[in-house]
Amino acid sequence: MIRRTIVEKIPSLRWKTSSLISRRLYSAAFKKFGEKSVIVSPLKLRGLENISLGKNVSIFEGCWLQAEAEGELMIGDSVYVGHRCHIHAYDQVSIGSNTVIADNVLINSAEHLKENLAQVQGTGPITIGEHVFIGQNAVILGGVTIGDNAVVGAGAVVTRDVPVGATVAGVPARAITSPSNA
């Protein structure tokens, strides 16, 4: 009984410790770090001077946030970013308020050059609206806009725009419901 209680308390302790670190360390390093935002045990944080977080943002273990000098990463208020997500802003990446990003999601506005795989180039800005749900293991590629209230299914690869209120799934992602037939 005591072991189970201790094991169940560990995530809560990690959250509280990360909250203190976020307030003291991260808030000074980011371009903007909103009140009550927390980053728990990140894998990598790069280009912090080009990353803005709104209020009440929760970013969980193993996440990789990176903004290149040419790009900017902007995350709105009350956004949930699940475990092991990778968000790379070579070009601008904007994530609207009240959005949920499940575990293992890749949001990437860059690609490697075929002639030299060590180099990357931008693929266009990514705009994710408000109240969007992005399912586990989804991939969002550059040059894409996802409208407000949209749903991206688990494992989907989004290569083109998603209309407001639509649900997309598959590889490449295609509409399975749209606002007109939802």
Image (cartoon, rainbow, N blue to C red):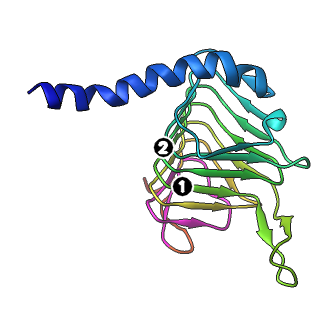
User: Disc 2 residue type?
Assistant: Gly
Q: Residue furthest right?
A: 70
Q: Which residue is mark 1?
A: 105
Instruction: Choose top left, top right, bottom left or bottom right for residue 75.
Output: top right
Q: Position of residue 139 (x, y in %)?
A: 58, 62
Asked if the stretch drawn in magenta spans residue 41, the answer is no
**Residue at (86%, 70%) from the top-left corner?**
119
* Residue 157 left/right relative to 161: left
**Residue at (74%, 47%) from the top-left corner?**
66
Q: Nearer the viewer, residue 80 or 116?
A: 116
Asked if the stretch drawn in magenta spans residue 161, the answer is yes
Stretch of the chain drawn in magenta: 151-170
Q: Position of residue 19 (x, y in %)?
A: 53, 20
Label 2 or label 1, whichever comes before in sequence order: 2
- Position of the N terminus by quadrant: top left
> Quick one: SS at disc 2?
loop
Q: Which residue is mark 2?
A: 82
Disc 1 packing (10 Å; few <14; some 14–19; many ≥20): many
* Residue 53 left/right relative to 71: left
Q: Position of residue 157 (x, y in %)?
A: 57, 67
Q: Position of residue 136 (x, y in %)?
A: 44, 55
- Compared to residue 62, the image places residue 119 above or below, namely below
Q: Residue furthest front?
A: 3
User: Disc 1 residue type?
Assistant: Val
Instruction: Choose top left, top right, bottom left or bottom right for residue 130.
Output: top right
Number of marks = 2
> Quick one: SS at disc 1?
loop
